[in-house]
Each structure stands twice: as C-alpha cells, then as structure tokens.
Amino acid sequence: MAATTVQAFNEFKEKLRLTDAQKDLVKGRRSSAASYLGDAFPTTSDLPLASSYLMGSAGRDTIIRPLDDVDVLAVFTNKDDIFNKIYRYDSQKFLYRVRDAISNYKVEVVGARGQAVRLFYKSQPHVDIAPVFKWSSGGYGLPNGSGGWLTTDPYAHSAWIAQRHKDLDYRLKPMVRMLKRWNNVHSKYLKGFHLEVMIATLFSSLSGDSRDACEKFFQWAQYNLTVADPAGHGGDLSSYLTLANRASVLSNLEASRTRAVNANAAEADGDHKEAVRLWRIVFGSEFPSFG
C-alpha cells in the first residue's frame, strides 16, 4: 500500500522487475538451451551452432513479472553453403531439423511453432529458440512460418533500446515495463517490441515524473501506432494489427488518457487516494492500493 501517488509508482516499478531468483532462472534456461543446441550441432556437424544469444524482452531487460517465455537466438554456420544447398527454399525443413535434433533432451515437448522451436518445461519460463543464419548483407535469416525467410536483427534491437535508454536518462526501461503491464491488463493488443519502440520513439526526453509521462504517452500514442523497425528490416511494426484491434487499442489509449488526466489533477489537489484509485484502473490490480 502507498500513502502518496509517487510512492505507489515507485512500488509499482519495483514490483514489475524480475527477482534475483527469476533472473537466475532465466539465465539457467538460456544456458540449458545453449547446451542442448551445442550437443546436437557440434563443430563436426554439417550444420554447426555458431552462437546463441538471449534476445527478446529478457535480453533487453524490459521483461516483467509474472515471468513469461524466454527467447533465445540460435545462429547456425552456413558450412559448405548448406543454406543454398538445402534450406534456401524450405526454411521449415531447417526449423524441423532443429526441433528433431533436440527432442530427446529434458523437456516435456519440443515443437515447431511458427518461426521458433519451443522447449516446454514443467513450469515457466518456457524457451522459444529462433534458429537463424547470419546474412552477409546484414541481419539474420529467420524462418517466416511458410517456408520462406524474413530478416531480423535482435542484436541491433537491443543496442538501439540500450542507446535510447541512455539518451532518456535511463528512464526508458522502467516506463516500458509499466506500459507493458498496462497493455497486458487491457487485452494485450500490442506486441511487446512494437510497444517498446513506440515509447522509445515518442519521447525526446523523460523526466522523473512518471505520472505526467504516462499521460503524455496515452495521448501521443493514439497518433503514433505506426513506427518503423529500428534495425531497418521489419518495416512498419504495427502491420500485424487488424482494423478492429487498432480501433480497440485507440479506445484503450483514450480511456487511459482520460483517467491519467483526472489522476494527475487529483494528485495536484492533494487527493492521493483518488489518484491512486484511478491509476489502479489504468494499470490493474498489481498497482499498489492507497493506504
């Protein structure tokens, strides 16, 4: 419980961060996945594993509680031009080979799911392995789910978010975590990385006043759902949104903007109880109560 709105926000930010035990669990999952892949695809293989990398929100340190899945990038060596000889026109064959090669390890289920191989554990986090080849022209080739390839670059994404975090006085990532919780509470229409790039793009500066920043985000985001992949490969990151979902996101943003305006007005009048009540509607039951 919190006696002031500022205290409520500070407690909320801390509550969203992974505990030390959860951080160790994530590292363990990543290490296990890397070990399974290294055993299955040694340097003597015709498809050797070159490297693995913790990517996604866990890799960018924007993941929130409760702990969800962990993403691992698995980079394979194009030994003897195996890409062009076997996989160029059949990325699903590549994906299924990775799946089948690690199916005997200590996981409940190993299955191909769209563009990744998922390792299911008895408890979360599960691990999604994204198998890729490094393109000589830049970025990485990832199976697109229909036999072809798409280009991505998680390394560039992490570097871009880290730079924006620094540019914004190291206040970006706490803001991202809060707004990820907002997104999850309100039907989770927005994909995580899309939301991160929106936030990082909208703000040219971030002060220590998170309440004001949230109000501004809910207002500005209504006109800025369309943002480009900062790595230059993915085009418009909002392209997955249907017209109906886009309309729902805009409705959620406007409703949250109205509550944020009223909450900030209540705080300015010294009514922290009302301000906290309104922010709890915006961010859900994990936002601290007043008291």
Image (cartoon, rainbow, N blue to C red):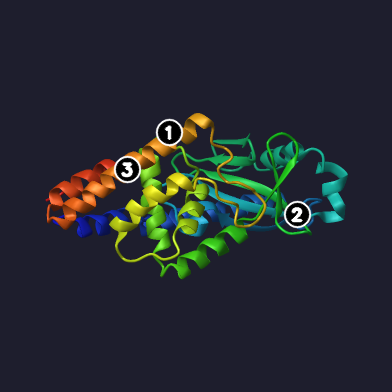
Q: Nearer the viewer, mark 1 or mark 2?
A: 1
Q: Where is residue 32 in the image (x, y as percent from the top left)?
A: 56, 52
**Closer to the camera, 204 or 137?**
204
Q: Distance between the residues labelled 1 and 3?
A: 12 Å
Q: Which mark is residue 256?
A: 3
Residue at which label 2 appears: 48
Looking at the image, tell me whether mark 1 or mark 2 is earlier in sequence order: 2
Q: Residue furthest top?
A: 244
Instruction: Name which residue type carries label 2.
Output: Pro
Please give the name of the residue rendered at 49% of the width and 45% of the height, measured from the top-left corner: 69
Q: Can residue 289 be seen in this view?
A: no
**Closer to the camera, 221 or 6?**
221
Residue at which label 1 appears: 248
Q: Where is residue 142 in the image (x, y as percent from the top left)?
A: 69, 46
Which secondary structure lies at badge 2? loop
Looking at the image, residue 186 sits to the left or right of residue 28; the answer is left
Instruction: Name which residue type carries label 3.
Output: Ser
Q: Where is residue 34 in the image (x, y as percent from the top left)?
A: 61, 54
Q: How far apart are marks 3 and 2 (CA)?
A: 49 Å
Q: Nearer the viewer, mark 3 or mark 2?
A: 3
